[in-house]
Amino acid sequence: MATTHLTKVGTVGIAVTDQDLALEFYVGTLGFEVRRDVELGPLRWIEVAPPGAITTVAPVPAEIPAGLRFFTPDADAAHAHLRESGADTDPQVLRMDAAPPMFAFRDPDGTTHFVVEEA
């Protein structure tokens, strides 16, 4: 039986053509709350969720792959484990000043997902 370093589904990325319109829909129409709205270099990262929900929704622009964002307490350990298990992962953990350590992996159908270190 395989073990995992992934602790939960943190965020579901949804591809959108207009982040402002998506934000208006999720907050204004569905009644979600804004959990995060920050600039990451040239990109904007938004997360919304129903009040009290653990998993968030991220309306992502075309430059960012949609998909699941899994959380882990240790991105390096999760990355090493997935690579050793034969998963198609990025070559290394990405570290950016404004974001936590993370890396992408692809499932057997080629869908890109991410593992993000949760502080």
Image (spheres, rainbow, N blue to C red):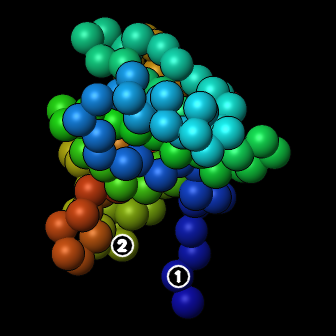
Asked if 17 appears above or below 68 in the picture, the reply is: above
* Identity, as a three-letter code, of the amino acid under mark 1: Ala
**Which disc number belongs to residue 116?**
none
Q: Which of pointers 1 and 2 lies earlier in the amino acid sequence?
A: 1
Left or right of 78 in this view: 94: left
Asked if 82 appears above or below 116 in the picture, the reply is: below
Disc 1 to disc 2, how far (Cα)? 9 Å
Q: Position of residue 113 (x, y in %)?
A: 35, 55
The residue shown at (28%, 70%) is: 107
Look at mark 2 in the image and give the residue it sits on.
85
Look at mark 1 in the image and give the residue it sits on.
2
Q: Quadrant of the N terminus?
A: bottom right
Q: Are marks 1 and 2 in contact (CB under 8 Å)?
A: yes
Of 13 and 111, nearer the camera is: 13
The residue shown at (32%, 61%) is: 83
Dot 2 crowding, Cα within 10 Å, few <14, some 14–19, many 20+: few
Q: Is residue 16 visible?
A: yes
